[in-house]
Amino acid sequence: MCFITGHKIHRRVESRCFTLIELLVAISIIALLVGILLPALSAARNTALIIKCASNQKQIVLGTAAYATDYDGAIPRGPDHTLGPLDPSGQGTWATLASNIVWVPQPFLPDADYNAQGILIEGYIHTYDILFCPGTDTPEAYEGQVELIGSRTDFVLSGYMYRALDETTYDKLDSLGVNSAGERATAMYYDVNRHGPPGMPEATNHNERIINAAYTDGHVTTFDNSQQRYSGLTQHYSAWPDARPLMTRIDEILIRLDSPQYTD
């Protein structure tokens, strides 16, 4: 390709030409630079989302602490009512279930009500947005959730699993007692990664490569989840709507988070 420039009439006309090979070399260099930069930009974006997710969880723990200040140290708990078909044994209640459910509809409760971390919505967190992970891979799993608060027919879900009173011997933020493995219970929230139940969309965060977990003292730690050690898998929903196999899985995850020797 040539670009012709003329300075004055009767003066020599100068010509600068690029050969096809030179043009292809230039395009190749640009493509190479783009190929180098895009992964770096993608990695930077993922890192930013992980940091924002950790910030969300820290803010939720701060909201939990504010709630505990108002209620003699107790953490938010769900209604003291049977779990119904989720636990046919009749032993579990919404007060003790570890879940990401923030609103329970009327078919499951005599009166629809906030549940567990959802209680923080009433004056303890400044925005609903912090209940949802910015690094979600499945935004369709959370579309319209906030608008369903107050519904008599639909659950509302958070992007973070909350321990409530599950696997603990006390209900105080500064002392939840111990879990079933005898370890001190300190993990409060972690990223939801769910492959079930039937009829509901999967919900995963951070491509399931990592999870963030928040603790009673407010610190947040990032763990490798490339082996799905902190995920609810299809087999854990095999008995759905009986949620007891899933509850067992959640207990396993919380024990790992409580116990550094399990979190490799």
Image (tube, helix red, strand yellow):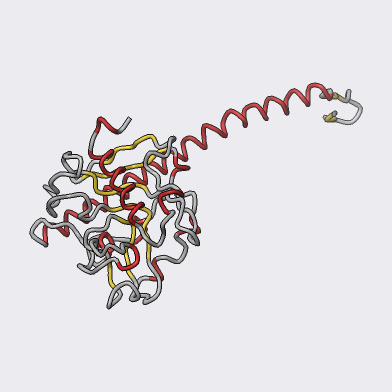
Q: Quadrant of residue 80?
A: bottom left
Residue 140 locus on image (x, y percent): 50, 59
Residue at x-position 34% and y-position 72%? 105
Q: Residue furthest left?
A: 72
Residue 16 visible in this rendered orientation of the protein: no
Residue at x-position 21% and y-position 52%? 62
Residue 156 locus on image (x, y percent): 37, 65
Q: Quadrant of residue 13?
A: top right
In the picture, measured across the screen, residue 49 lies left or right of residue 259, that is right
> How many marks overall?
0
| 127, above or below 182, in the image | below
Observer-nearest residue: 141 or 27?
141
Residue at x-position 31% and y-position 49%? 248
| Image quarter (top left, top right, bottom left or bottom right) of the N terminus | top right
Q: Quadrant of residue 257?
A: top left
Residue 238 locus on image (x, y percent): 44, 54
Observer-nearest residue: 178 or 1?
178
| 67, above or below 236, in the image | below
| Image quarter (top left, top right, bottom left or bottom right) of the C terminus | top left
Q: Residue furthest right?
A: 10
